[in-house]
Amino acid sequence: MNRYLPILLLLLPLGCTSPPEQGPSLPVQNHSRNNPIVAFYKGKPITWSQVSKKALQIDRKRTLDIYLRWRVMEDAIQKLSLSPSPLDRHHRASQIVQEERTQLGKKAFFSRLKQSNLSEKEYVTQLAQSPLLKETLVREQVLRYDAVRRGWVEYDQWGFSSIKEAEQFRASGKAPKTPPLRLILYGNMHPTGLSKPTIDLLFSTPRGEKTLPLQGPHGTYRIMKVHEKSQARPVPWAEVKREVFSWILRNPPSRAEFLNWIDDQLKRSKIEYAHRSAERN
C-alpha cells in the first residue's frame, strides 16, 4: 500500500484544498485564471466553473458541506500563518517512513523500495517535498495547537456487549482480545455519541484510572481509561510550536480526531443556507 494513502484519508473530511492537480499544459482558449480549464471531454474544454455549477445542481448540500469543511480549516491556517520548515517536513516524512517499515516488515519494505528504484533516504526526501505532506502537517499543527489552548484528555476506550463483561474487565484488569481505541477529546468539545456527563467524567478521572461501565449505543457498554490530559493553556503559537511538533511526532492526529474537530468548528460557526433563509421569507 502506498504510504500516501493514510495522509489522503486524513484530508478527505476537510474537502479539497485547491483545484484539481493539472496534468500536461492545456491551451487557455481565452479562459481567465479564475476559471481555468481543468479537463477535456471529447476534445472540448471543461472549465472549473462548469464543474462547480454542476456539482451544486447534483447535490447542493454535500457540495456546500465539503466547501465549509475546507473553509473552517483554511480560516484556522490563515489565522496562524503556518508554514512548516523543510526540516520539520523532513522529520515528519522520516517518521512516516519508519512507521511504514514497521507495518510492512523490513523485507517487504525494502523490496518495495527496490521496485521503485529508491533508497530509503531518497524516499524520505521525496515524501518530505510532497505538497500533500505539507498540507497535512499544517492541519496537524492546527489541531494540536487548538488542543493545547482548550485543554485535552487522551484515553483508551473498550467496548462490551453486556454490563457483565464490562464489570468483569474492570475488576480483573485483563485486557480483551480486541485492542482499545486511543482517542483524544478537546475541552468544550461535544462529539456525537458522548454525553456531557461522560465528557465531564473523562476530564475529572485521574491519569491511569478507568471509568465505571458506561452505557453506549444499542445496548452496549464501554469503559474508558485516561492515559494523559492537560489543562487549557491559552498561549501564543510561538511559545508552543516546538512542543506541538514533538507531540505530532509522538502521536499524530487520527482521522477520527480530524472529523470531530471539523464537526466541532462547524457547530461553533454561524452558518445559514441561503435557500433556507429564502424559505422563511
Image (cartoon, grey):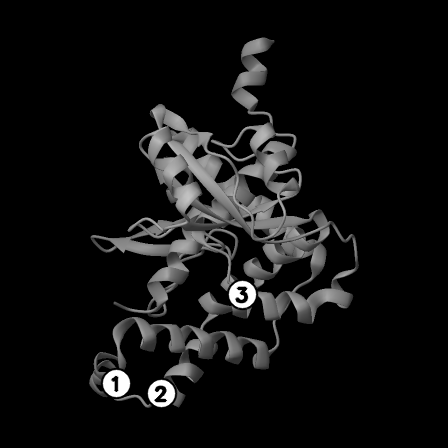
Find residue 191 and report its horizontal and vertical position in percent: 53, 35
Is residue 82 visible to the viewer in this orientation of the structure?
A: yes
Q: Give the position of the N terminus as an image quadrant.
A: bottom left
Residue linked to disc 3:
137
Mark count: 3
Res. 110 mark: 1
Q: Where is the C terminus found, in terms of image quarters?
A: top right
Q: Residue at x 79, y 57 (%)?
A: 235
Horizontal relation, residue 235 to residue 251: left or right: right
The answer to the question of whether label 3 and label 2 lie on touching residues, with beta carbons closer than 8 A, is no
Which one is nearer the viewer's eye here, 60 or 187? 187
Going from the N terminus, do you reach mark 1 or mark 3 first? 1
Sooner in the amino-acid sequence: mark 2 or mark 1: 1
Mark whose residue sits in front, 1 or 3: 1
Under circle 3, the secondary element is helix
Q: Residue at x 42, y 76 (%)?
A: 127
Q: Mark 2 points at which residue?
A: 120
The answer to whether mark 2 and mark 1 are in CB contact below 8 A is: yes
Could you tell whether 232 is left or right of 102 in the image?
right
Q: Answer with mark 3 or mark 2, whichever residue precedes in sequence.
A: 2
Considering depth in this image, is 40 or 236 the residue closer to the camera?
236
Q: What residue type is labelled 2?
A: Glu
> What residue is drawn where x is 60% and y is 61%?
141
Residue 26 in sight from this viewpoint: no
Cα separation between marks 1 and 3: 26 Å
Label 1 SS: helix
Task: Give the spatial CA distance, label 2 vs label 1.
Answer: 8 Å
